Image (tube, helix red, strand yellow):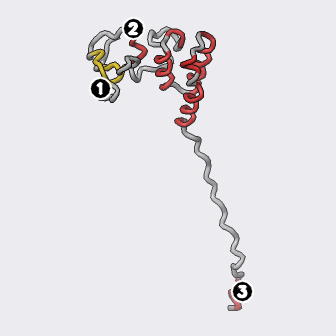
Amino acid sequence: MLATERLWRTRGGERLVRDGDLDAAILAYAAGDEIAKADQGLIPGEANEQSPEGDGPFDPSKHTVQQVLQYLEGTDTEETLRVFDAEVAAAARKGILDQREAILDSKKESTPEPEQEHKATPAPANKAQRTPADKAKG
């Protein structure tokens, strides 16, 4: 896989970021450079339901804790739950499972609430309304 733009490694080296990211520390790849297989799961914005190798659904056991957490940032609730289930079945790493509730809560916050119908509320009856007979009396 070739880099389509410059990618920078963060200070801890745990992820890659694009030009302009405040966490960028060391230039890792220039546009056109071959990206190492180990770094392909770290490419920003590349998270999808396929693993970076493209051989099926994302398998957390083939990735580092940081790569799994980064992948989960770009997934919907259903995929997030699938990945957590796969993690429990395989390695059950504390660094991932400890983040479960926070990640799922963030998915709830980012999911728009369904719009509720706004029904018109009838105006309260005005007890002081005058009838036509009252109006004729003056």
Whichever of labels 3 and 2 marks the residue nearer the N terminus, that label is 2
Residue at x 44%, y 12% (from the top left corner)? 52
Residue at x 49%, y 8% (from the top left corner)? 55
The kind of secondary structure element at disc 2 is helix
Left or right side of 100 for 63: left
Q: CA distance from mark 1 to mark 2?
A: 21 Å
Q: Which residue is mark 1?
A: 19
Q: CA distance from mark 3 to mark 2?
A: 89 Å
The three-letter code of the residue at mark 3 reads Asp
Mark 3 neighbour class, 10 Å CA radius: few under 14, some 14 to 19, many 20 or more: few
Position above or below: 9 against 20: above
The three-letter code of the residue at mark 1 reads Asp
**Which of the 4 image quadrants contains residue 16?**
top left
The kind of secondary structure element at disc 1 is loop
Q: Which residue is mark 3?
A: 134
Whichever of labels 3 and 1 marks the residue nearer the N terminus, that label is 1
Residue 58 x, y percent position in the rendering: 52, 14
Q: Which residue is mark 2?
A: 37
Q: Mark 3, mark 1: which one is toward the viewer?
A: 1
Residue 25 or residue 58, whichever sits in front: 25
Point out which mark residue 70 bears: none
Residue 124 or residue 76, whichever sits in front: 76
